[in-house]
Amino acid sequence: MEFTETDCTPHIYWSVTNVQTADTPVYTNLDSLRQPNTSVLKLEKEVLEPGDYIVCLEVKMPSKGPTFWVSDCIVIQIVLPELIAYIAGGEFRTIPYGGVAIMNASVSGDPAQNMSSVNALPLAVTWAFVRYNSGTIFDIFQTNTQALPKGGTYHKIGHGNDYLLSLDTSLFHNGDIALIMFKLTRGPRTSSAFQVIKMVTNAVPIALRYIHCQI
């Protein structure tokens, strides 16, 4: 008996098709994403724009006779990540009264800012704060997180794309409390961060710093 060696290596093909379903479905094959002869399809970050896609795997087994093949497909949806809004310093701060305090939200941003379709929409920043007089109990903000205390004065400030808010505390009173809000908006997406500050004479700023040491 004589055995003849044949090529039994399967041929693997990946394909990605974009589906647009505004009125009538439109299917667009993304030829640049076709990946042959690999068992794992790898798509780099931000390669696909938001939308619906059909990802198909086709496996062919070559032979001298009929070619055997099998295929399978899945539908995936690419969605944009949430915007990141953050004010440095934590949720509660005590700041010196009589000087200028800086609210820093520079670490905020859009994780998908490198996508062309995302950059077509402007990234808008809005600062706002509600001021309370010195008679307001500071602890009420920590115990009641579902509603704002009554008696506050609301101020809204539009700054375009300014991530720093300069607050002249001398315009207020010693002991006043303010609820600071930073809002980031791009199209239908929005994200907000809050910070409660108390203006106190001769307040000593406190910060935690990590120092690595070996024991």
Image (spheres, rainbow, N blue to C red):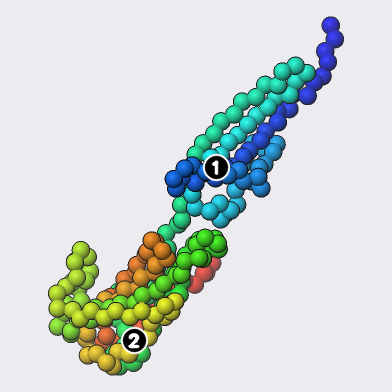
In this image, 132 relative to 25: left or right? left
In this image, 96 relative to 113: left or right? left
Residue found 70% across the figure and 31% down from its top: 11
Residue 192 placement (x, y as % from top left): 34, 67
In this image, 37 relative to 156: left or right? right
Q: Looking at the image, is 110 positioned above or below residue 6?
A: below
Residue found 22% across the figure and 69% down from its top: 142
Q: In this orientation, which residue lies closer to the viewer: 141 or 46? A: 46
Q: In this orientation, which residue lies closer to the viewer: 212 or 149? A: 149
Q: Mark 2 vs mark 1: which is more N-terminal?
A: 1
Q: In this orientation, which residue lies closer to the viewer: 113 or 116? A: 116
Q: Amino acid type of disc 1?
A: Tyr
Extreme residue in the front direction: 24
Residue 136 placement (x, y as % from top left): 16, 79
Q: Which mark is residue 27?
A: 1
Q: Which residue is mark 2?
A: 167
Residue found 14% across the figure and 83% down from its top: 135
Say which of marks 2 and 1 sits in front. Answer: 1
Gap between marks 2 and 1 measured at Cα: 53 Å
Residue 189 occupies quadrant: bottom left
Residue 51 placement (x, y as % from top left): 49, 49
In this rendering, does residue 178 appear at all? no
Q: Amino acid type of disc 2?
A: Leu
In this image, 97 relative to 17: left or right? left
Residue 63 occupies quadrant: top right
Q: Looking at the image, is 41 positioned above or below residue 11?
A: below
